[in-house]
Every structure is written in C-alpha cells, then in structure tokens.
Amino acid sequence: MARRTKAEADATRQALLDAAEDVFHEKGVGRASLAEIAQAAGATRGAIYWHFKDKVDLFNAMMDRVTLPLEAACRGPDADGDPLARVQGTIQSLLATAVEDAHTRRVFEIAMYRVEYVAELGGVRERHEASLKRFHARLTKDLALAAREQSLALPMADADAALGLQALFDGLLQTWILGGTPFDLQRVGADAVAAYLRGLGYRLQGDMR
Amino acid sequence: MARRTKAEADATRQALLDAAEDVFHEKGVGRASLAEIAQAAGATRGAIYWHFKDKVDLFNAMMDRVTLPLEAACRGPDADGDPLARVQGTIQSLLATAVEDAHTRRVFEIAMYRVEYVAELGGVRERHEASLKRFHARLTKDLALAAREQSLALPMADADAALGLQALFDGLLQTWILGGTPFDLQRVGADAVAAYLRGLGYRLQGDMR
DNA sequence: GATTATACATACATCCATGAATGTATAATC
DNA sequence: GATTATACATTCATGGATGTATGTATAATC
C-alpha cells in the first residue's frame, strides 16, 4: 500500500494503540501477538514496526496515552486550600476517572492483571515504582501539613501514614477492577479513606463531632 | 533413565516445583519455558509432563503448596475471644509469614507481578477471587460481631468496612513486595490497620483513651 | 522370579512469533 | 514536476516452545 498523509498516519497509530488495548486485555501482553494486534487495527505488522520499535515500545506508548494526562492532572493544584481536602479530592478524582472512563479502566486492568513485571519489559516496573513514589511524596507532604494545621501528633510517621493511605487506595482500586465482588468504588473509597484519616486523628470536614 | 522409588519420585516433584518458583520468578510465568524449569531442576521436560498435565497445572500445584496451608491456618481458631483482636491477629500473622518466609513471599510475588490473569490460565483468577471472598466474609462477620459487642454503629456497611480493611491489607502487602520503598511491613501494617479500625469507631485494646 | 506398572529421558513433528529485509505507491518538498 | 522521504504491506528466515510418541531400566507386586 501507499504512503498516507500525516493525519492518516496518526490515525493508524491511534488505531494500533486501541487494538493493542483490546488484544492485551483479552490475551494478556505476553500471549498477544503483534499480528493479531495489527489485524484488529485493520493493518499489518509492518505498520506496528513502523510506528513502534517492538512490543515493549507499543506497550509503553499505550500506557503513556492514559497515565501521562492522569499524572499531569494530579500535579495540578498544589498549594491551595486545605491539604486534607486536597488529599481526599485527589483520591476521589482518581477513583472517579476509573469508574467513569472505560478507556482508562481497561488500561489499568492491563497494567494490574495482564502483564508480567519482568526485567525484559524494560522499565515498566521502574516507571510504576516511580509513579508510586511521586504520589507517596505528595501524600506525605499533605498529611504532615494537615497535621500541623490541626496541631496533632500522628500515631505513626508521616511517611508511613501516607503509605497506608496509598495502600488503601491501591487496594480498593485493584479489588474493584478485579470485579469479584462488585461495589460502589467512589462511595466505599470515600468512606474508607475518611475512616483511615479519622483513625489517624484528623478532624474531617463534614464530620458531626 | 530408570524407574525411581516413590520417595525419589516425590523428591523430583518437589524439585520441579522449586525450579518452577525460581524460573517463574525470574522470567515470568508466560515467558518461562518448561525446558528451562526442567533443566533448573536437573531433569527434563519428560519429568514435568509426567508429574503435571501442562504449565498451568504446574503453576497451580506451585500455588497450592503455599496457599493451602495458609488458608488452613486462617480458618483455624474461629469463635474464641475478641473478634477484633482476631482480625488484627490474622492480618498480623499473614504479614509475618510474608516477612519471615522467603518461600511464601516469592510465590506471592509471582502471583502478584509475574503472571497474567487471563482466561487461558484456567481458574487462576477465579481461585484468587474465591480466596478473597472467603477472607472478606470472615472479616465482615468479625467486624459486625465486634461492633455489636462494643454497641456501636459503623459509619459504613459491615461488608464495605471489611472491603476497606482487606484493600488496606492487600495494598500494603503488594506495596511492600514491590519493594520500591522498603518499610517495616509488620509495624506499618499494625499501625495502619489500627488507624482504620479506630476511624471506624472501634475502641482497640492497648489504646490510651 | 516373571510380570507389570512406573518414572522418567529422548526424539519427533508442528506451530507460531519475531525481526529484518525488501517492495512500493504516494505525500512532501524543493 | 522531479526527487525524496514516508507509511506502510509483503516476504523470508529463524528459533523456540509445545505436545505427543516412544524407549527403557527398574521398583513393585504377585
């Protein structure tokens, strides 16, 4: 076939990424063949090898398309208002994205249950860890700030308290995506996070006492 | 080679399971070849196909060797003493096992980060979900019991509160095993669980107020 | 002590995925 | 409007993994 215009080329690139999502989700990243992905996109492996170096590169591009905007959004409002409300807001907004955007949800599901975090997949694990660390640093800072504002001493180190909060968030998201026991992620998430924060000693907005 | 005695046969079976752990952990389940596993065990693929139906069967056997005893231990003491202490104790004992038993830890790591939960792996995902559901049911029952004993109304449904606790546990274990930010799993686990339970309204043993 | 089932090792056939090489028609570029 | 880089499709060569079939020496069994 012949050369496409730049717009057309980008369209096939997006189609390849869409198809990769489908096939990765269905077969898992390891057992998904580039031929099947290409076919699902109405193209051939030639197109994939043109746009991407190999399967790992394709996978990373697929992840970036979803995670980059998300992380950018997380870094958005930094120093305004109540740090505790900001923590709760960030978590709520991430959970909301998972619930409302099927696209994002499927990519999360792939990253959590459909890929093997092995050396060969160059940097996938490292990038996941880096992303977690940034989130953790932010939570730690905000929790410490809020503790000072309410002039209370946490029953555990700031960083550990943040670790627990992050674990709670991750655990809820993963449990919900696994889907074994369906539940209202946003409501349970809000309540569980509130309980955890309250248990740390914080006084939350909207609490009766 | 020739026929082995029954004890010898079981020894090679165990060696195959050990080797499977090693290779699965290193390469991931998908990219691990049966030839490599056999070689790591000092045997050939013939031995694997004698003891196991295929790779899935081998994987399940490897999982069973660790999870069956664990689940049995969890089901152990059922109706004695304080239900809240029992919840905390169960979680602490599971975390302790992860910390102390490298064998168990590696199998957990394989199940969490080195395998694709895909239809083809027949029942792996389903068994995981079933195990989670049993744990969840137990937590729900104990949390409800403890709430009645302390005559308090939880700020969320029993099942949802249990969901949060389980998510917290899962999240902590996974974060710890991922290893990006090393921390004291048992201490942070105990503190975070205590905070969550306190935030739900429970009065915990050993609390000052 | 002859027979039989066992516990593997070896050999074989098949399939499929990958990566690179090559072809090619056409947008861009000048 | 000739040239060139582009955006793929097609073909080829290779390797590696799987499953099965077969061989075989020896514990068990009687």
Image (cartoon, coloured by chain):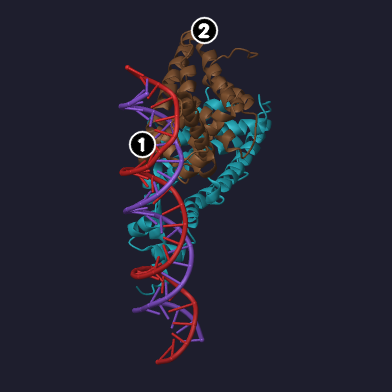
Chain colours: A brown, B cyan, C red, D purple
Residue D29 image offset from top left, x and y in percent: 49, 81
Residue A204 sits in which quadrant? top right
**Total marks placed:** 2
Q: Which label sits in the foreground, 2 or 1?
A: 1
Q: Are marks 2 and 1 in contact (CB under 8 Å)?
A: no
Tag 1 secondary structure: loop
Assess disc 2: are there few (<14), some (14-19) or many (≥20) residues with their C-alpha within 10 Å of its C-alpha: few
Q: Earlier in the sequence, mark 2 or mark 1?
A: 2
Residue D17 image offset from top left, x and y in percent: 41, 55
Q: Amino acid at mark 1?
A: Gly
Assess disc 1: are there few (<14), some (14-19) or many (≥20) residues with their C-alpha within 10 Å of its C-alpha: few
The residue located at (40%, 65%) in the rendering is B47
**Left or right of residue C29, residue A2 in this image:** right
Using the image, determine if residue B119 lies above or below residue A104: below
Tag 2 secondary structure: loop
Residue A28 image offset from top left, x and y in percent: 50, 43
Between B46 and B105, the residue placed more toward the observer is: B46
Q: Which residue is mark 2?
A: A81
Q: In which chain is the residue bearing label 2?
A: A
Q: Which residue is mark 1?
A: A122
Q: Is residue A102 visible?
A: yes
Residue C15 image offset from top left, x and y in percent: 47, 57
Q: For the N terminus of chain B, which image quadrant? A: bottom left
Q: CA distance from mark 2 to mark 1?
A: 40 Å
Between A64 and A168, the residue placed more toward the observer is: A64
Between B75 and B80, the residue placed more toward the observer is: B75
Q: Amino acid at mark 2?
A: Gly
Using the image, determine if residue A58 lies above or below residue B28: above
Using the image, determine if residue A151 lies above or below residue B198: above
Q: In which chain is the residue bearing label 1?
A: A
Tell me whether marks 2 and 1 sit on the same chain. yes
The residue located at (39%, 63%) in the rendering is B12
